[in-house]
Amino acid sequence: MSDEVRKLPKEAYGGIKGENYRPFVGNNENVPEATVYSIILGIISAVIFAAANTYLGLKVGLTISAGIPGAILATVLFRSILKRNNILESNYVASLAAVGESIAGGIIFVLPALILIGFSLPLWTVVIVTVIGGIMGVYFIVPVRKHLIVQEHGKLVYPESMAQAEVLVSANQGGKGFISVLKGLIVGLGYKILSGGLALWNETATYIIKRFQGTMIGTDTLASLVGVGFIIGTKTSILMLAGSIVAWFGFIPLIKFFGGMVTTPIFPSTALISEMSATDIWSSYIKYIGAGAVAAGGFISLAKSLPTIFKSFKESMAGFGKGERTSERVNQDPSIMWVFIAAVAGFLLTWLTPTVKAGPVGAILAVFFSFFFAVVSARMVGVIGASNNPVSGMTIATLLVIASVYKAMGANGADGMYVVLLTAGIVCVAIAVGGGVAQSLKATYILGGTPKKVQHGMFVSLAVASIAAGATVLLMHSAYGIGSGQVTAPQATLMKLIVEGIMTAKLPWTLVIIGIFIAIFCALTGLPILPVALGIYLPITLNTAIFFGGLIRLLVEKKFKNDKESIDTAVERGTLIASGLVAGDALTGIIIGIFAALSIKIDFLSSIIPNESVKNFISLAVFVLLGFWIYNYSCRFKKEEKMHNA
């Protein structure tokens, strides 16, 4: 047997038609996948990541990707403890772990708004909403999987899916690839401990430009973001940065310039514009514009994709009732019957379950928007990865429509808000799960796994993990109070404002419509809508960090611009190290979250640098050094080859 270390083939990133791609594990290889070991470990991982991400999301409004750390954990446990070295089992565990993060995002964006309005939120309600949205999110992807994953191979990047696949291949094979991932993991872990844990430096470096209406420039100095930026490259990250530049150097100074002398608050803010910071203006005004752009971009994207969606449905329907006769493991989708079961179950449970009480109209809207945005979410994950998937933006669009319909039907007051939020919560879970499932299915396709086994497993694991996520929400509310300084729940707070705004006829429609026209402008000029809309909707600090990672990759490619083989090698090394950074950041962030949940303070180094300006500078300097290390490591293989040959 050969000792040669196998690598993920270059064709995994494109260059050939998806139908001609040969997966890492061949279809003729009989390899276990959904085993007792992988099912149990996958469900446990989903529970852990769901609880940890629910905490982090309520705390800071962000969740951490679970697919990559789940892949590393699975490989380590299988190899070191269970003495099994099967890549498809590890991928199965990673996929189930990823759905834990997905439902966490789906839950925290909407359901805590019920608490903010004054309702109780029983654990059973969280579980019911998650299961209804989860079954639709998992199985509504079935008719479009082949188009998104196979036919769009190489066009839709699925950056985190490819990182997950690289991690699994490298960890499974050992050798230099695994060492690269391990180095990135260790650096990411140490970086996160010193910054997010011990608080030696900040995780954000910002600078106020006072002479330009007090607008802000800065970056989130997170290892995970620079890693994601390297993986997705410059093309997408620069468009996201462009959207942020329009928002923070166009709209915010404009609002401050014209509104700074107004002596009364301008809706929807309750504060004077002259007293608002750039971040306050972004939160009160710009996010509505971004939400409108994201929603319009989703509608336009779906409209363009309708022919291929109908074709995928037709192909799926052609196999209805004929069973799953394909012998190729990578093409074994769940039966089309599961799509109908998901739709019928979603409709009936939303309509008839006493916990939801949405009625037939609400049930129809829930099923329609769950399918609509689950498909859009699956495509967007292919562009920017699940970590940056604007689930809250699509949920805002859903909430706008559902609340408007209920308002027109005469629903008002707290009871109307209750039904609207639960219905939107179901759709939100479906959106988050749809994107997470697509990400896992791409990694499964690249490695040679079975789609139907992964999807069935993800549904079971999300149902179990919903209990842990719901319990975490209730624990946080009991300990700190949802909406307090310790648990800000930013997305849920925004959802509360929107539903109250519509039910009381006080929504800033002008801002939403401005966003819609920005999306139309992008469509007419041929610009990709989604990255630009995301740049407006997401904080500039996040987008600059991602752009920094993309810039590093561009510099690596420029260094070897006349040598295609060297470019591929350097980018591969950089992708592996970036994947390790993302994993190290994520794993450590979860551990830090557990300490925080237990009220154990670990920021022992926070007082070493008392001056905030100095701390800001050090945060940025360390972040730049991290980027230089990624660049140097990516390009250093030539020196290593010379040393090896010598």
Image (tube, rainbow, N blue to C red):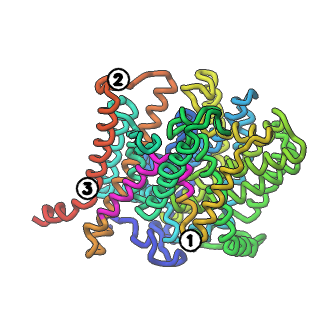
Q: In this view, does 128 lie to the left or right of 152?
A: right
Residue 343 position within the rendered picture, expressed as x and y whole percent measured from the top left: 78, 56
Q: Mark 3 points at which residue?
A: 633
Q: Is residue 83 visible?
A: no
Q: How far apart are marks 2 and 1 (CA)?
A: 52 Å
The residue depicted at 28 percent of the width and 72 percent of the height is: 561
Q: How far apart are marks 2 and 3 (CA)?
A: 31 Å
Disc 2 packing (10 Å; few <14; some 14–19; many ≥20): few
Indicate which disc, 3 or 1, sits on the residue closer to the N terminus.
1
Q: In this view, does 12 lie to the left or right of 290?
A: left
The residue depicted at 50 percent of the width and 50 percent of the height is: 67
Q: How many marks do you count on the picture?
A: 3
Q: Is mark 3 on a helix, strand or loop?
A: helix
Q: Which kind of residue does numbered mark 3 sit on?
A: Tyr
Vertically, is 58 above or below 512?
A: above
Q: Mark 1 points at which residue?
A: 525
